[in-house]
Amino acid sequence: MNMEICSNMLVTDLNRLYENFPVQRNEVEENRFRAHMQSRLTTNLSLFSEVDAAVFIDTNGKIYTSYVPEKDETAVNYSGLTQKLLKQGSYGSAYWFPMEQRDFLTPDPDVPVLTLGKVVVDINSGEKYGTLYLMIKEPTLSAFLGSSEPSNQKKYYLIDERQMIVASPEKERILQPVTDPAEYRLLAEAKGNPETRTQNVDGKWLLTVTDFPSLNWKLLTVVDVAILTKDIGKNIRLIILIGFCCLVLSIIGANLLSKAVLYPLQQLTKAMRRVMEGNLQVQSPVRTQDEVGLISRVFNKMIQQIHELMRSMKEEQMRKREYELALVTSQVKPHFLYNTLDTIYILNDMERNVEARNTTKALADFYRIVLSKGRELIILEQELKMTIDYLSIMKMRYPDIFSYEIDVPEELKSAPIPKLSLQPLVENAIYHGLKTKGEPGLIRITAREEENKTIIVVEDNGIGMSEERLKEAASYRSENKPIQSIGIYSVQERIQLYFGPQYGMNISSEEGKGTRLELAIPLVNDRRSETHVQSYDRG
């Protein structure tokens, strides 16, 4: 993920660099261009510690590196690496090359590297500038596979689609095929299956294969069964001992208690059973002045209060629902704030002060409306302003992923709407519809009047959803499954909570063409919007 973000930032920086230099450069301009190029590459790599090196190759075959090459790097022009990347299609998509050891495009020829490639084009004209490569060394990956157990008891391997070991603490096995029959058989069974698979080998080793779909890799874990079972015997003996002691104490206690309180408790139990059956006209006879008698009196008092509690139960349930929804939407996800602050920091560090200032202003305006003096309802005009601020920030982070259009009639902007209703839908469109599309997409927000309702439409031309995925998203939350989409669920629930079941959301999507969401909220034609919002707001 960090490598893809780094590549996106470098694509933007390279576009800006080409704006300041001609495509055909003399020797002096080329030297200045090369110095600026190396500065851009090294600056971006300093922000992403996982990325070890970056290389840019222009359409004329000139090579620009973030490191000082030990050997002649021109061998890449004859390796077919660039041609393979250009055949992958869209410039917006990143292509992962297999882990390999080579003597070009790497700061250390003796260490295998994983390479991410991306075609760099002019975002305005579509003209190709060249190809960009980011490298991460194998030791960086294998550092995450360490274990506190002895090396002969617990082992980890990353396996690619070629059944080759691409990362492992055991250096001698790197870039070697899987030869163990049990390991090979389990990997073959897991091929094309995202589910985790486990196999016991001769009662000595436990093999587990976990899927990494983004790279089409598998994580193979080999654990000594003795580690997992070494404490089972001790635990079994301890459980048996504790159970036996509890049994003896239970028998003794039952005999003592039955003589003292059995009969009064039986009477109280009968009264409780009748209450469980729905009879609330029961009274427990109070025969003693001891603790059992006190319990009986408390029980009788409790039955009297149940009627009052039942009358207030509906109101309490409604409040609880409001509190739960308020907890879901009370604040914007922290990672959005952190990522935006990181973007502002990077823009300032790159001396892009105007863009940093605009991003800071958009973030401040966004949170000003989010707070909205503690109210849960705002007018549609304010919600649109907040959504535009959010889109401006995301546009700065992903400049080549999407554009947006907003067309809402002025007379509909006074409609009341729960705050943060459009932002989750726009966020879903960016991350689940457009980011993986492979080319720039469009988000469009419109509104219309229909059957005395305000219909707000949020649509994109992204990858869309399959019929199965659409059914899951449109069900909002099923009986026996967790929430499928917190954003969609929160928007749907809050709209119906404040305005009633006749309002809400409708989702339609076509795989490969995009997704369309329609929100129905009350129609308010009167421009005195604040009065209408306060009349709806229960908070």
Image (spheres, rainbow, N blue to C red):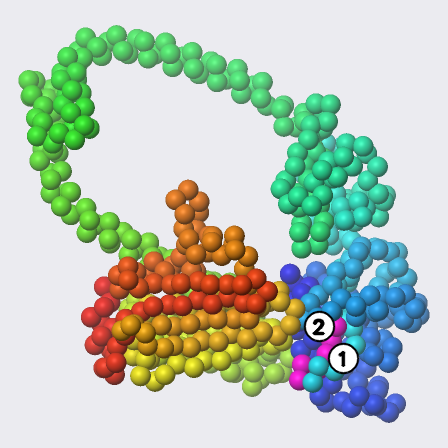
Q: Is residue 179 magenta?
A: no
- Please identify the quarter of the rendering in which residue 9 is found: bottom right
Q: Which sits in the foreground, 456 or 450?
A: 450
Disc on the earlier residue, 1 or 2 = 2
Q: Which residues are magenta?
A: 119-124
**How many numbered discs?**
2
Q: How far across and how far down the image is residue 83, in percent?
A: 84, 69
Residue type beneath disc 2: Tyr
List the residue tagged with mark 1. Answer: 128
- Please identify the quarter of the rendering in which residue 147 is found: top right
> Residue at image x 82%, y 78%?
58
Q: How far across and how far down the image is residue 116, in percent?
A: 75, 63
Q: Which sits in the foreground, 378 or 425?
A: 425
Q: How far across and how far down the image is residue 423, in percent?
A: 44, 69
Q: Considering the numbered disc 2 on the image, is that residue within a helix, a strand or a loop? A: loop
* On-image quarter of the C terminus: bottom left
List the residue tagged with mark 2. Answer: 91
Would residue 96 appear left or right of 60 to someone viewing this image? left
Q: Which sits in the foreground, 367 or 320?
A: 320
> Residue at image x 27%, y 11%?
254
Residue type beneath disc 1: Lys
> Residue at image x 81%, y 82%?
34
> Residue at image x 38%, y 72%?
456
* On-image quarter of the N terminus: bottom right
Would residue 515 appear left or right of 225 to someone viewing this image? left
Q: Residue furthest front?
A: 451
- Please identify the quarter of the rendering in which residue 28 is found: bottom right
> Mark 1 near mark 2, Cβ–Cβ under 8 Å?
yes
Q: Considering the numbered disc 1 on the image, is that residue within a helix, a strand or a loop? A: strand
Q: How far across and how far down the image is residue 504, in percent?
A: 34, 63
